[in-house]
Image (cartoon, rainbow, N blue to C red):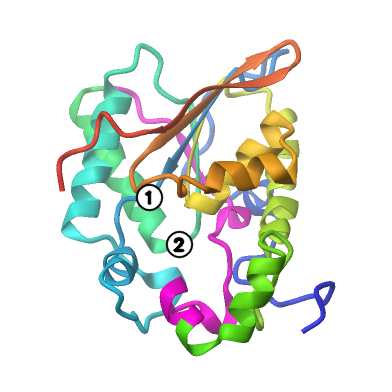
Amino acid sequence: MRTNERVSLPGNDNGWERGDFAAPCPHQEHSGTVARLDAVRHGQSTANAAFAAGATLESDDMAIALTELGERQAVAVGQWLAGLDQPPELVLCSPYLRARQTWQLAEQELRAAHRNPPCFGIDQRLFDRYRGSFAHLSPLVVRARFPEEAAKEADDPLGYRPPGGESFEDVAARLRGVVASLAAEHRHRRVLIVAHDAVVLFLRQILEQLTATQVLAITEDGLVGNGSITSWQRTPDGYRLVGYDQRAHLPRP
């Protein structure tokens, strides 16, 4: 497959600009933009648990659900949000089931704490990296069954596309649209994104203007954990990272 070939991806459209909101927004427009951005990786999914055990999960990637641990992690995220002096005013969520379930459980904790729930929208650009023919296979299985493809990815970890899938550079390209939308956001000063590990990583690249070498250095320690929180604060020069892969709020496995 040529690296510049276009592929058909799930949910590949303009997300929340289409008005995918649960209710009309009560917030008034202001002259500023998003001052605080938090990103949460969904709780542990059945695929995460299977891959950790070296197994394969044959399922539609968009329909993979949370495990019991993943549900508890989502509840913990909600409790963390409920304890903030200023919880998010807007939540943008991946269309994938595991992300939507994470937010639903977190929102229940906000409501239980008598905090006003934020505006909520599904952004179709926040889906996980689409791995095409390898969508249901763990990296370990791919290396064992398709060594030539694994070698291609090792040679070009950010630009490689699995058969029928997308590269990490493709993920970054669609996330630039999300960041552009946030730059034009004048109703909500605090925004929460609920999505996937690849989304968090490439939000870092875009918001912090990291090089490919810097991105790969981050991945050497692994990607963000399930239910973890990554946060940025707006400064005159752009966004500054204030916390990465924070897990102190999470329950023990």
| 197 lies above or below 150 | above
Callout 1: few (<14), some (14-19), or many (20+) C-alpha neighbours within 10 Å? many
In the rendered image, residue 120 lying in the magenta stretch gets the answer: yes
Mark 1–mark 2 Cα distance, whole angstroms, equals 10 Å
| 183 lies above or below 160 | above
CB under 8 Å between discs 1 and 2: yes
The residue shown at (31%, 51%) is 43
Q: Is residue 108 left or right of residue 90?
A: left
Q: Which mark is residue 96?
A: 2
Residue 3 percent location from the top left of the image: 80, 74
Q: Quadrant of residue 47?
A: bottom left
Q: Is residue 178 left or right of residue 102?
A: right
Q: Is residue 52 left or right of residue 10?
A: left
In the rendered image, residue 180 lying in the magenta stretch gets the answer: no
Callout 2: few (<14), some (14-19), or many (20+) C-alpha neighbours within 10 Å? many
- Kindly identify the amino acid type of the residue bearing the numbered disc 1: His
Q: In the picture, which quadrant includes the N terminus?
A: bottom right
In the image, farthest residue toward the bottom: 145
Residue 250 percent location from the top left of the image: 23, 36
